[in-house]
Image (cartoon, rainbow, N blue to C red):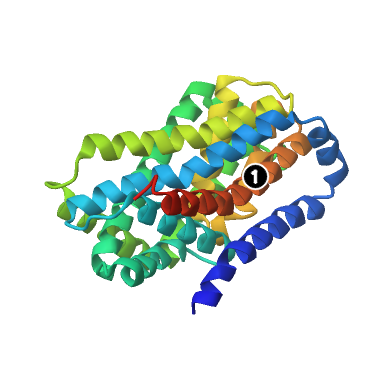
Amino acid sequence: MKDRARLVVPVAFWVGLAAALLVLWLSGQAGDAWRSLSGARVELLIVIVVIGMALPVIHAWRWRVIMAALGHSLAASTAAGLTVSASLINYATPGFLGAPAKAILANRAEKIPMGRSLVAIALEQGLDFLLLVFSSALVVLYIGPARFSGLLSLGGWLPSPAIGVAFVALAVVILGVIGRERVARVAGRIRGAFAQARDHVSWGAVVGLTLLYWLAQVAVVGVLLWALRLPVDPAMVLALGTLPLLAGQLAPVPGGVGVREATMVALSGVTGVGAASLLGLAVLQRVLLVAALPLSLLAIRVARLSGVSR
């Protein structure tokens, strides 16, 4: 079992890398995307990897605060290591397996009851989803709904954006009917998590860490635009750093692979950046953040062995 666990890091890395490259190749724009990547500033790409290494640490910090409020103390290095491992599993497996994997790992490593871990994870998922919905709405209002008219008309394939809105609304209704039991179950779990933690969690710290986690992900997009010598506009950074995250969280595929990238490309008309450049940016973002996970795990283990993190 331990030997299999050690294989998670390299397998997840290469699966994530292969999936990202496959998306690029299938798009038929690999050449244009490669040209947009060839002049990237290497020093800024290193900065992105460092931010990517910090992302699971921020996530683990929030999880640790919530678990402490629920009566389970976790060492910083343990929480970070479990979070990175769960993130790798989420990239390497279909569906939403990262959350239950984290609960299983916490149970095996720290004897934390599965139910208690799932309460904390449901609370985190609810906070992340609420923040992404709220920030996405603000992005649309900030940029202006008119800028999204081309996207809603599917690049001119539909005669009117209103028809696009109708199609989206219909799709939401159909998905809601088909998956109403799942939606009700997830919503109930999140409501229950908020109810259990309401009087115990330090909400200032938890909300602050949720905002920090989102800002770090937005910062990755901003630095990547800068590294690729693309226009760095606040509205563009917010759109590319928020809307694909929401789409990826809603999609039942490993780590939102392909969905985030497709959303970024779809935003080319909104941002004014070429589709090939955005596709290259999206794939490079995926590769760098996947590569950052095993590096983060290595740094955590080194810190633990050196006694820096306990």
Q: Is residue 273 above or below residue 213?
A: above
Q: Nearer the viewer, residue 4 or 264?
A: 4
Q: Is residue 15 left or right of residue 112?
A: right
Q: Name the secondary structure under disc 1.
A: helix
Q: Is residue 218 left or right of residue 114?
A: right
Q: Is residue 104 visible?
A: yes
Give the residue at x 64% y 47%: 286
User: What amino acid is at disc 1?
Assistant: Leu
Q: Is residue 293 left or right of residue 66?
A: right
Image coordinates for residue 96, horizontal then vertical, percent = 47, 63
Q: Is residue 221 above or below residue 101?
A: above
Kindly indicate the quadrant of the structure image that contains residue 108. Answer: bottom left
Residue at the extreme bottom: 1
Q: Which residue is identified by label 1?
A: 288
Q: Nearer the viewer, residue 59 or 302?
A: 302
Image coordinates for residue 61, horizontal then vertical, percent = 34, 45
Give the residue at x 49% y 51%: 302
Residue at the extreme front: 306
Image coordinates for residue 132, horizontal then vertical, percent = 43, 40
Disc 1 crowd rating (10 Å Cα; few below 14, some 14-19, many 20+) is many
